[in-house]
Amino acid sequence: MLALVGFVATLGLITGLIHLYLWKRLVRDTTAPGRWRRVGTVSALVLALLVPATLVGTRAGLYWLAWPGYLWLAVMFYLLVLLVALEVPMLVAKLVLRRRAAVAEPTAAAPEPALVGAAGSTDPPAADAVAGQDHDPARRLLLARGAAIFAGLTATGLTGYGVRTALGPPVLDRVQIPLAKLPRSMDGLRIATVADIHLGPLNGRAHTERIVAAINRLDADIVAVVGDLVDGTVAELGDAAAPLRDLRSRYGSYFVTGNHEYYSGVEEWVTEIDRLGLRVLQNRRLEIATRGGVLDLAGVNDAGAEGTGVAAPPDYEAALGDRDPSRPVVLLAHQPVAAVEAAKYGVDLQLSGHTHGGQIVPFNYLVRLEQPVVSGLGEVDGTKVYVTNGAGFWGPPVRVGAEPQISLVELRSA
């Protein structure tokens, strides 16, 4: 309970500060005191409250908040990024306007000599200075409105494009990965890999059916679902997950938990996923006997299990210890950073998700601070790591720069 209160308080503070900045740039700087500024202020306050209300309310079953709340979250993010990026050019433009106004004052025509106190006498320099200053606020207002219009249109356009991408069909990424220990007789073994399906308020049964149909068209040897399947309980999303029972592969379908499973009742989901025909690899390893040889397939629980009290944290020794080192081993682990530990056990290849490929540019640059690989094939301490972008989304139904993805990993003999 205390953790939830702390989360809501932190979220409210961050959201409030962001909306205060947006109010200053979009409302105060672009309107005069009066009716329109009051309307803008009230709107900013309502939108500021909408964000935490959505994140908390959707977890409490108020799914009607999802569309307006998450769409505004995406628009808010891009407004923030764009307006911050415009700060420097806006500052330069303001300095130029001030310089021009200052230069214009001494260039005013020199006044004719006049006797002090004479009838009809004027003070042209003072009048010219006032005239020069009168134009400066008008220009600054025009500049602020231009920046606000540009940021608003661009943020809305990017969000619209991102919604269309996120709700579209997953693209297929085919990748060939050579493994030194893979015998020639197993060359070409194919693993259909999908992660981050994120069934929830905005993704239901039709989303699962589309993913299952796409995977089955690949005719893969193994299917690997590497975490973050759901954002809700079995009671809420059991029907949405049901099409997973139709997954087809030669040597089975396998699942490892992601961090979101631990927010959604992991014990019930492990039972349900097993009932649907996927084998859940909870810190364990299996031998996949193929026509050409044997492959070790291992899986570890996500680090999100730590501290929950309902599931064991990732145990690499249990999953990878005491195995035949001459055989190739593929590890399923939700987060790419797991490769730091996996490499100590000589893992040949790790398949992961979690990052969503960044989901919304420029988040991909922030993800790099936490994860060694954001998207595609990389390497960590000698262990190859392939990260799929994920087939769903979390939060805003928006993907910019990282299309939803299903991956077909083809193992090749080196």
Image (cartoon, rainbow, N blue to C red):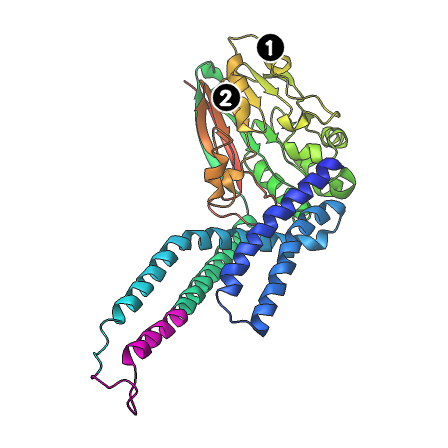
Looking at the picture, tell me which residue is in the foreground, 131 or 219: 131
Give residue 394's position: percent from left, percent from top: 60, 43
Q: Residue at x 64, y 32 (%)?
A: 259
Q: Residues within 10 Å of mark 2 (few under 14, many from 20)?
A: many
Provide the residue span drawn in magenta.
112-139
Q: Look at label 2 and name its amino acid.
A: Leu
Element assignment for label 1: loop
Residue 264 vertical placement versus 288 (above, below): below
Q: Residue at x 59, y 43 (%)?
A: 392
Could you tell whether 292 is left or right of 65 in the image? left
Q: Which residue is mark 2?
A: 349
Q: CA distance from mark 2 to mark 1?
A: 16 Å
Looking at the picture, tell me which residue is in the foreground, 227 or 175: 227
Q: Quadrant of the C terminus?
A: top left
Give residue 202's position: percent from left, percent from top: 65, 49
Element assignment for label 2: strand
Q: Residue at x 55, y 23 (%)?
A: 338
Q: Look at label 1 and name its amino acid.
A: Gly
115 within the magenta span: yes
Residue 176 vertical placement versus 121 (above, below): above
Could you tell whether 374 is left or right of 234 in the image? left
Q: Which mark is residue 321?
A: 1
Looking at the picture, tell me which residue is in the foreground, 305 or 239: 305
